[in-house]
Amino acid sequence: MNYNSTLVKSTIIVCCLLFPINLFAQQNYSISGVIILKELKGDIFITVVDEETNNMPMGGIKKQVLIPTSKKLTFSFSNLPEGVYALKCFQDENGNEKLDRGMFGPKEPWFLSWNGSKRYPPRWEDINFRLDKNKVFEIVLE
């Protein structure tokens, strides 16, 4: 090996250390959309969950509380890395900050990002989706 090839290799190593280029950088995506309401009664709670936070009572990766001023609201969650998520939403008609449930399911308007059969109680396999591009949802709360 001669002096010039050693110098070139050393220069490349120094450049890579000083100016790191992550060729495998993970892309971030967004989940957005519109929520359509039947009534303007109660705040709207919307949450992005992953499998780990799915069953936590107040769990979630990102959350928003929207105060309805019209029957059509927009939402957006940004900077989410590629992965598997679910979207949960409900209208808190009685102001207790939780989705009230009865014997046969929720008593308040609600939404899950269903990907298959709509069985109750829902399983993670029924509501998750792969986020590998920006996603847009239309959520109808009735």
Image (spheres, rainbow, N blue to C red):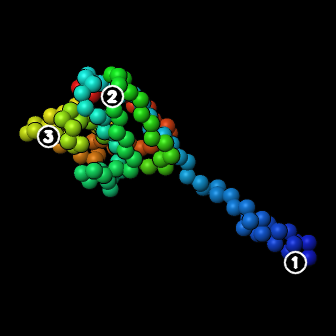
Q: Residue 71 occupies which quadrant of the picture?
A: top left
Dot 3 alpha-carbon crowd within 10 angstroms: few under 14, some 14 to 19, many 20 or more: few
Q: Earlier in the sequence, mark 2 or mark 1?
A: 1
Tell me the quarter of the image containing the N terminus.
bottom right
Q: CA distance from mark 2 to mark 1?
A: 72 Å
Q: CA distance from mark 3 to mark 2?
A: 22 Å
Residue at 28% in and 50% down: 58
- What residue is rendered at 21% in x and 32% in y? 93
| Amino acid type, callout 3 | Arg
Q: Quickly name the residue at label 2.
A: 68
Q: Where does label 3 land, which residue?
A: 101
Instruction: Judge whether 61 appears above or below 3 on screen.
Output: above
**Mark 2 residue crowding within 10 angstroms, few (<14) / some (14–19) / many (20+):** some
Residue where numbered disc 1 is placed: 1
**Dot 3 lies on which element?**
strand
Q: Nearer the viewer, mark 1 or mark 3?
A: 3
> In this rendering, which labeled residue sits more in front, label 2 or label 1?
2
- Regarding mark 2 in the picture, which secondary structure is present there? loop
N-term mark: 3 or 2: 2
| Side (left or right) of 71 relative to 12 | left
Q: Nearer the viewer, residue 47 or 43?
A: 43
